[in-house]
Image (cartoon, helix red, strand yellow):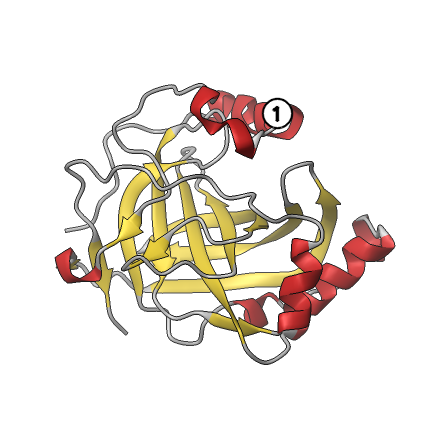
Amino acid sequence: MFITGCTNITSTNKKDIEEKVATDEVNYTDQKNWAFESGDTQSPIDINTTKTQAMKDSGVIELNYNNAVLDEVDNGHSIQVDATGTAKINGRNFDLTQFHFHAPSEHKLDGKQYPIEAHFVNKAQNGRIAVISVFFNEGAENQGFKKVIDSIKKGDKNTDVGEISIAAMLPTNKSYYHYLGSLTTPPLSENVEWYVMKNPVEISKTQIDAFQSYYNSNNRDIQPLNERIILKHEE
């Protein structure tokens, strides 16, 4: 069993979503007034790992992300890096469009919240959105995240950023939890496929502090699971 939902985010809606998120102020201290398109399958959630179900499909994720950066910007609610590459998820093809960060993490695992969570946003030709979520935990310095922080400090954009080791910001073991949810910023559109990596990636305390000097508490509140099923894939 693989959760994909029943409707697609069209290319027109996708453009509207991108423009709205890019231009609207995201006020994290006033989340109760964020507008909902609907509200039954919202993200993020607290994943109770004891209540997940084993995936019946193979569920294999193959990530082939390019290190060359198109752009890096402080977009007003996170640091966003525009990049390219491909993701093959359970045999379906997606293209990486961008990745960004939230501090502290938006998702939780059994009530545990991590210092930072990265979202790698992938889109298919039919408009479907699949987000790879990676928790960052305090540990050794991360060379990929170091370049992200160093570049934003200098205000680098476009080709000035050069390359970022995206692989350094992804866990080697790609076991994950999968559920159907939403964007975590307005317009909070639903039918987004979430793949929350089970294993965190290490970054240093200095790197955590550096990001939090830009953003601290740019995380959406936990949302009700309602009747949704959470699947797990083990490598």
Neighbours of disc 1 within 10 Å: few (<14), some (14-19), many (20+): few
Image coords of residue 163 (percent x, y): 73, 64
Q: Which residue lies furthest to the front in this view?
A: 29
The quarter of the picture where residue 19 lies is: top right
- Report the residue at 43% width, 55% height from top: 133
Q: Which residue lies furthest to the bottom in this view?
A: 140
Front position in the image: 72 or 141:
141
Query: Which SS class for mark 1?
Result: helix
Left or right of residue 87, residue 233 in this image:
left
Which residue was labeled with disc 1?
19
> Can residue 91 be seen in this snapshot?
yes
Amino acid type at circle 1 is Glu
Q: In this view, does 106 lie above or below 27?
A: below
> Can residue 162 be seen in this snapshot?
no
- Report the residue at 14% width, 37% height from top: 227
Left or right of residue 203, residue 164 in this image:
right
- Report the residue at 52% width, 61% height from top: 115
Image coords of residue 142 (percent x, y): 62, 74
In this rendering, the count of numbered labels is 1
Indicate the quadrant containing the C terminus: top left, top right, bottom left or bottom right: bottom left
Front position in the image: 20 or 78:
78
Front position in the image: 43 or 215:
215
Image coords of residue 68 (percent x, y): 70, 60
Left or right of residue 143, residue 55 in this image:
left
Image coords of residue 59 (percent x, y): 26, 60
- Report the residue at 25% width, 28% height from top: 40
